[in-house]
Image: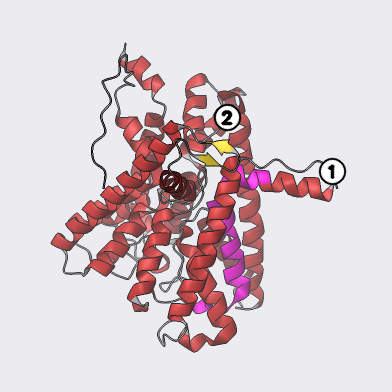
Amino acid sequence: MTRRALGARHPARFVVLGFAGAVAVGTLLLMLPVATADGSAAAPLTALFTATSAVCVTGLVVVDTGGYWSTFGEVVIIGLIQVGGLGIMALASLLGLLVARRMGLKMRLAAQTETKATGLGDSRVVVLGVIRLSLAVEAVIAVLLALRFALHYDEPIGRAAYLGVFHAVSAYNNAGFALWPDSLTRFATDPWILVPISAAIIIGGLGFPVVIEVIRAARRRLRRERRRPHWSLHTKITLITYGTIALLGIVAITAIEWSNPRTLGPLGTPGSLLTGAFSAISPRTAGFNAVDIGEMHPATLLITDVMMFIGGGSAGTAGGIKVTTFALLAFVIITEARGEPTVHVMGRRLAASVQRQAVSVALLGVGAVFASAVALMLLTPYNLNDVLFETTSAFATVGLSTGITADLPGAAQLILIGLMFVGRLGPITFASALALRDRGRRYELPEERPIVG
């Protein structure tokens, strides 16, 4: 089989190359003198780190976004966030539709891999739907934020609109880039800022397939149709798991930080409830912070680590191993504890291949975070809490930081760059992109059970 044929069989390679190309272009643009506020060319590592963080919708930074970069640089960053959030193949497919009115087979395969479309026939519908939904949500959130900035914070209309668009795009794409050095800490008690941003985080983080099903169900209710909406298993698992983890996170983080004088303590009851909820929603995986992460209790940091690692929904802008993967692992454990031969969930049987994929994604994620944390502990003087938080945030493309990112040596920053890239593409996508070919097995060996546990 030729190399060309092998490449066609692995469309995930095009996704990896597309993201790598976007990072390369972004790095070159950010290295231009016009991209910095003082007119000097940014260091290659600074440009590379920022471009990777933007394309991988992470939000980790080594320089102050609003102070270091010029307006041109900020526009490049928000452009990279939009490209990374919508997806390289989704945008390329849209361009093909606009220019040639059609999508080739190779482009359909790549778009299907990136957007998790269920079949080749619906790739075009999915791509257009993703872009329409994204732009609509970003527009609504941008208007709400711009009005708040203009009417309450006395920002000029142009500046308020710019701030609204920048942070709406950053929030919906779960990127976490902010134009203030303290992220959103100054808005800790302002629901007109935190609530719209939280809504954008949730909508983008649930994933396109889930949001579309919810919208369709809402339309049926408005039309008063008697036929009850049919929820797919994926949507059920995503909504239940996402909501449960979010609720547990809100309760845990708010309770632990309630009396912390350096976080929620001084905010009063309404402010503490609002900021506590935001501090549990943002790790799913947006990366904005309304309190100083470095001042949080170690228990809160560990809880946040877990929430970041799990992440949000599949086929969305969130990172992590995804809530569906986490739920599937729980179902496998429950089934094994019951001694049942197959995994049944909500009236459906899970395929063995899905179970293997969930285990693979989780273990590869754990391995990547663990190995990177060990490397950072060898390269830096920071303790395990800070290093584990940083590596988990990078892998899960969250962007929250205890404040050590900018002080890391170059080798450590390169490790975080690799983590962000792998975390955005997903361990399975990345591994399949590197595989030369699928290996079919034409025979099975005799079965034997080793001792487990």
> Can you identify the residue that label 1 sits on?
226
Residue 194 magenta-highlighted: yes
Magenta segment: 186-213
Q: Depth check: 8 or 442 in front?
A: 442
> Can you identify the residue that label 2 sits on?
123
Position of residue 109 in the picture relative to residue 396 (left or right):
right
**In the figure, residue 292 lies in which quadrant?**
bottom left
Q: Residues within 10 Å of mark 2 (few under 14, many from 20)?
A: many
Dots 2, 1 in contact, CB < 8 A: no
- The residues tagged by marks 2 and 1 sit, at their Cα atoms, a distance apart of 30 Å
Marks 2, 1: nearer the viewer: 1
Task: Tell me residue 268's x, y (percent).
Answer: 55, 87
Q: Which residue occupies 49% across, 56% down?
A: 174
Main SS type for the magenta part?
A: helix
Q: Which residue occupies 36% across, 60% down?
A: 60
Residue 435 magenta-highlighted: no
Task: Tell me residue 426's x, y (percent).
Answer: 38, 42
Amino acid on which the number 1 mark rests in the picture: Arg
Q: Is residue 314 above or below residue 97?
A: below
Q: Residues within 10 Å of mark 1 (few under 14, many from 20)?
A: few
Of pointers 2 and 1, the one earlier in the residue sequence: 2
